[in-house]
Amino acid sequence: MATTKLKGNEVNLIGNEVNVGDTAPVVTVAAKDLSDVQVGGEKGKAQIVVVVPSLDTPVCAAETRKFNEEAAKIENAEVTVVSMDLPFAMGRFCTTEGIENLTVGSDFRAKDFANAYGVLIENGPLAGVTCRAVFVINASGVVTYKEICPEITEEPNYDGALAAAKDATSTSCCGTCQ
């Protein structure tokens, strides 16, 4: 069972553990306008999937602003921030913060994303929401980078995630040839 920490206290993560080299599960989350947003799978471009507990916290807000800024610099990539926030709250956050270079997706309906990617917190004060994580998926739908942040209250390794995203967009290989 995977774990992370919340303010130094270990919490368990449940769901299907996805690792580098795995095919990224295709999951539907709700956009800020309640339309469907597909995350994972083969899209013909790189995907950066940023997982946060809630946009309504300083660390999650800072992380989302950073990925919004950096997303505009990466060609042939899309960034989706996934949390359990209600779509309306996500929309308000994006409007207030000027978030325009990424998509937000709410996993509030059935926690399908959290379970499919193994990022659902099982115990502790944040039980039932997602931990802090970043997945990079290449154009062929394969996970090329994974970071489950060791401490939920701390920001991810931006340099590592962004370098992996650039690498995931820099190849013309579909990943199926040997």
Image (spheres, rainbow, N blue to C red):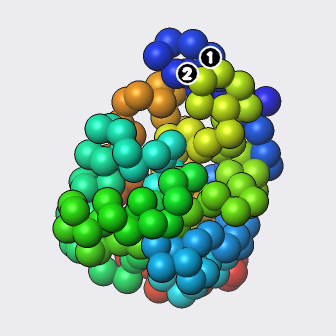
Q: Secondary structure at mark 2?
A: strand
Residue under pointer 2 = 5
Q: Residue at x 71, y 46 (%)?
A: 118
The answer, for residue 141, to whether it is visible in the render is no
Q: How dense is the environment of label 2, judged by Cα within 10 Å: few (below 14), some, or many (20 and up)?
A: some
Q: Amino acid at mark 1?
A: Glu
Q: Which residue does the image show at 46% across and 73% down from the upper left?
A: 32
Query: Could you say which is closer to the camera, residue 14 or residue 146?
Result: 14
Residue 13 percent across, percent down from the top left: 71, 34
> In which quadrant will I find the N terminus?
top right
Q: Is residue 30 left or right of residue 111?
A: left
Residue sitting nearer the eye, 51 or 57: 57
Q: Is residue 99 placed above or below 65 in the rendered structure?
A: below
* Rendering quarter of residue 43: bottom right
- How packed is label 1: few (under 14 Cα within 10 Å), some, or many (20 or more)? some
Give the farthest residue toward the top. 8
Residue at horizontal 69 percent and vertical 81 percent from the top: 176
The amino acid type of the residue labelled 2 equals Lys
Q: Pointer 1: what residue?
A: 10
CB under 8 Å between discs 1 and 2: yes
Q: Earlier in the sequence, mark 1 or mark 2?
A: 2
Name the image quarter holding the C terminus: bottom right
Distance (Cα) linking label 1 and label 2: 4 Å
Using the rendered view, name the quadrant where residue 59 is placed. top left
As drawn, the label of residue 44 is: none
Choose top left, top right, bottom left or bottom right for residue 143. Answer: bottom right
Whole-percent x and y of residue 159?
A: 30, 47
Residue at x-position 37% and y-position 30%: 154
Asked whether the viewer can see residue 9, the reply is yes
Asked whether 127 or 168 is in front, the reply is 127
